[in-house]
Image (cartoon, rainbow, N blue to C red):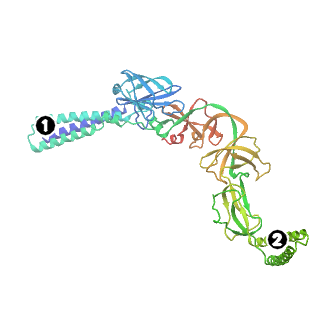
Amino acid sequence: MRAAFRLVASLVLGLGLAGTVAAHEGHDHGAPPAALSANVAPRAEAASADFEIVAIARGAELEITLDAFQSNEPVENADIEIDTPAGILKPAGKAGGRYVVSAPFLAQPGKFDLAVTINSAGKLDLLTLSLDTRRPAAEQNAAASPSQSVSAGAGLQFASLAVVGAIVLAFLAGLGLSRFRSARGATAVVMLALAAAFAGATHTPAKAAQSARDVAQRLPDGTLFAPKATQRILAIRTRVTAAEAHAKSVELPGRIIPDPNASGLVQVATGGRLSPPEGGFKALGTAVKAGDVLAYVRPPLPSADVTVQAQQARELDQQISLLARKVERLTAIQQVIAKSQLEDAQIELKGLRERRANLERVNREPEPLRAPVDGVIAAANAVAGQMAEPSSVIFQIVDPDKLWVEALAFEPYELTREASARLPDGRRIQLAYLGAGLADRNQAIPVQFAISGSARGLRSGQFLTVFAKTSEARNGVALPRSAVLRGANGQALVYEHVGAERFAPREVRAVSLDGDTMLILSGLEAGKRIVTQGAELLDQIR
């Protein structure tokens, strides 16, 4: 019995190894094509001047993605009809330019010719394509699906182990299971064989097909495979390039300055001690009107001046007293004197009283500091009790809606009126050229521009980069700055949309055209679809 048991165990082991070897041979049969890092579903694509479609077979369903050819924007609410070997199908629209319809004929491997009629926004188009489901879709994208060969090997192993189990059962039946101990050992062998069979069954072709998924990836040749679902997430947008003549622009460092016609300085005419107005000093950013009192300055009086003014006050008081009595006497006898005598005395008395009042005012009334223009307080240097020197700036008033930009040019460029600027946070503003100075400022020429449109969010003193256009022109392809990336080697590059789900990097030579645009001078031809939005995210695909 022990010899029989060893015979059965050897048979089980031998057939199990044979199954394993057969699976390995099936997996390595033939040279596999260049592989993607993951499976993709069977698919086909077609394009016209208006539309681009991708047809994807997902089991017994057919999925269509519809995009505008030039911009790669999803086309929604389109009327689509698909002429298939099984008849006319009308897919239901989903979000994001997806259309899905049941197609049972796709469950069987084969090559199916499809004609897709598209009617959207007055545009009618007919696209034809051929969807092949006989081989893994990864092969259609220059890739292989190793999971199928592994599943085939697992299936063969399962069949071999099932035969082993049957042989063992027949062998035990022939022996009659005469002894309990031998029967228990044989049963253990049968259970081991069945467990191995079920373990191999977990990798059936059906489960392998279910594990297939569309994954964005970078191919060995450097191009990118990005399924339409990934393009939707990354919001990929494209533009068809055109070569045109553009005015050459120069890049200048600059900063924002107040408009001298809408700003002003509050300065002290004579030195003195500062005191706040009613309500206190105004805070930075407070809106003020021309003429508003912002502070007071009380000039200090030396002791000698105080003595002189006191003496002048006593003399004036004495003169006023004498003249007042004279006016009283003349008033009493005005019937017998000339009227001119009384009038002259009254005028002289009035003048003396005004001089006395002015002398008192100089000692007591401070000098008011008033806002010269409407605007907001941009700078303040006022503290109660502070001694202010003559001509010192206490407040700066700026109109935030009227600002200029001053840039520094290191060559005498012939600039046109068109210009723009880019802030460090990426914002872009339009400028209008005003003029350039002739004086040298640290070996640079000051150039001034006015900010066109709203200056909301801008502050005097902010630094920015000015892009000023010159009268010189150059030919090239204009692209948004977001389309031009910097490669690992430092070379500028863009991504060309070479297929519905394929993108290829192109090295280019680019210069700044303005705050939002780069000019491609070489490395890119006209008529190519270039990624203008989402290029940086697309470049992260590995």
Asked whether, in this view, residue 198 is left or right of residue 48, the answer is left
81 over 458 or under it: above or below = above
Q: Count the marks: how many?
A: 2
Q: Quadrant of residue 358?
A: bottom right
Asked whether, in this view, residue 427 is left or right of residue 136, the answer is right
215 over 385 or under it: above or below = above
- Give the x, y percent position of residue 503: 51, 34
The reply to whether residue 69 is in sight is yes
Which circle, 2 or 1, is nearer the viewer? 2
Q: Amino acid at mark 2?
A: Arg
Q: Which mark is residue 355?
A: 2
Q: SS class of the residue under badge 1?
A: helix
Q: CA distance from mark 2 to mark 1?
A: 140 Å
Q: Quadrant of residue 31?
A: top left
Q: Within 10 angstroms of label 2, few (less than 14), some, or many (20 or more) residues?
A: some
Is disc 2 in contact with disc 1, using a CB cutoff of under 8 Å?
A: no
Closer to the chain start, of discs 2 and 1, is 1
Q: Quadrant of residue 317?
A: bottom right
Residue at x 17%, y 43% (from the top left corner): 188
Pointer 1 residue: 172
- Give the x, y percent position of residue 523: 61, 34
497 over 304 or under it: above or below = above
- Give the x, y percent position of residue 473: 71, 35
Residue at x 40%, y 28% (from the top left corner): 91
Q: SS class of the residue under badge 2?
A: helix
Q: Within 10 angstroms of label 1, few (less than 14), some, or many (20 or more) residues?
A: many
